[in-house]
Image (tube, grey):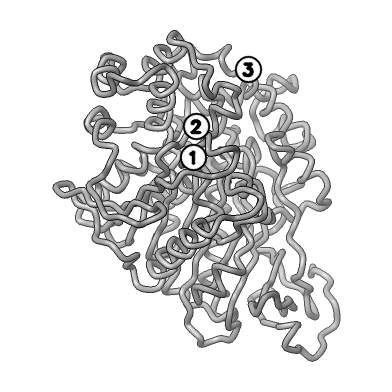
Amino acid sequence: MTIAASEPSEPSESTPEVRVAGGALRGGREGGVAVFRGIPFAEPPVGPLRFAAPRPVRGWDGVRPAVSYGPPPPQGGHFGMDELARDAAGDDWLTVNVWSPEPNPGTGLPVMVWIQGGAYSIGMSGLPEYDGGRLSRDGGVVVVTFNYRVGLEGFGQIEGAPANRGLLDQVAALEWVRDNIRAFGGDPDRVTVFGQSAGAGSVAALLAMPRAAGLFGRAVAQSVQGTFFAPELAADIAAACAAELGAVPTMGDLSGVDPVRLSAAGDAVGARMDRWADRWGPVAHRAIPFSPVVDGDVLPVTPWQALADGAGRDVELLIGHTRDETRLLAALDGMLGQVTPEQAESALDVFGPGRDAARRYRDAFPAAGPDELYELVNSDWLFRMPSLHLARAQTAAGGRAHVYELTWSAPGMGGALGACHGLDVPLVFGNLDRGQPAVLIGESPFPEAEELSARMRAAWTAFAAHGDPGWPAYDTEQRLVRLFDTRPDLATYPEEASRLIWQDHTFPALPLLGR
């Protein structure tokens, strides 16, 4: 069976055509860059393939138009993403998009493959903030974005289904890049994966996955989400989600459930996870129902353990975080400036490392009030220390890591959010006036935002091309990092107090606490 496509015609400057393993593709040209959207890299994971590992896509006859994004996978309801997914009809969830300044075989350009975040519950490559045109044109790189399954479809622990289906989708996309990117002018031996938040957690997971070995030589991890689940915890959360539907988490019970209902069940559990705090621990307090599962097969061990054991020694790593990671999340939760001493104390106890973490934070930050303590421990637990420890593990095993911190305060919303989570996304892509993160920049981007974006894009693309972003590699003695602000600086890692508090923490897979 083949997919129907249009009859071939003569390509022109405005309608570039390429041939991939599945057949011929006709894209478009925007701002001097060739763009191909909605290219399937795997069969639709529906019907008999629901909850299965991704299967290679079948070919098509004629020339397939590649001008529109493919439909996103089912989404959670955050930021209206479920509505966006429902508005895009179709079940061809697993597609890639390619931007290339020179789509000719043999050009040999560096390739940058983006993995979007969204707490493993939401995320789609078709959002305007992920348009790769400016990054591709200005950096002379081929940019690839793609969809992968999220929520219960991608990360729910379902009996009879492989674990971490969302990660397996990512591997399948990278395999597609390996096999087809030459047609777009890319070099399959010069592939860099880069991602932010859950996308950076995915990058960390890929570094630990035997199935991903050899598919990329460089990796950029922006604000690594540090939540990885033990199988028992993932199974317990999946059971609660299935119970919302009067079902159990097996392929037999869930394969016939409409994906929209399944996503809604995940949302319902996520909205009241505090009910299970005694069983699910910190993720219940932060309402994180889905994360990669350390299942011993797809993901044998945590990324920190894998890198400490040398798994990523041959992969060059660029990694960092923003200074004020969870300030935006506090604002979304309605807690910005509203944290009580009791809430701060609870956060220190829940998220801090070790039984005396609360005392150590108070001693290290004696002038900090409840809001600052709450933000510090949440930022350290969820993003900052997972990122730093990944660099430390890489370095300790003999690999190379370049570390950065974004310290520029976002001018949007009156500057109240500082250098918050997600601010790096518009800066790295150069899309300062579109998409959800652009509200952090303001309606009219400041010249300093343009200048900072240019510096970050230059660093990211230089790293993809040559492995050198423009500052020295991190080591455990000097601990030099690049600070991205109005004026760039090279300094000793600035979050020293947090580093010392967390220096003995190992970031194990998060367990199920009770039965």
Q: For the residue labelled by badge 2, is the local secondary structure a helix, a strand or a loop?
A: helix
The percent coordinates of residue 195 (x first, y second) are 49, 53
**Residue located 43% across and 47% down the image:** 408
What kind of residue is marked 2? Arg
Q: What residue is pinned by disc 1?
A: 420
How many angstroms separate mark 2 from mark 3 (CA)?
Answer: 22 Å
| Looking at the image, residue 247 lies above or below residue 128 | above
Q: Do we see residue 83 in this rendering?
A: yes
Mark seen at residue 327:
2
Mark seen at residue 148:
none
What kind of residue is marked 3? Arg
**Residue located 53% across and 65% down the image:** 175
Q: For the residue labelled by badge 1, is the local secondary structure a helix, a strand or a loop?
A: loop
Q: What residue is pinned by disc 3?
A: 272
**Residue located 25% across and 23% down the image:** 364
User: Is 202 positioned to the left or the right of 308 in the image?
Assistant: right
Label 1–label 2 contact, CB within 8 A: yes
Dot placed on the residue nearer the N-terminal end, 2 or 3: 3
Counting other residues with Cα less than 10 Å from the Cα at mark 3, is it few (<14), some (14-19), or many (20 or more)? few
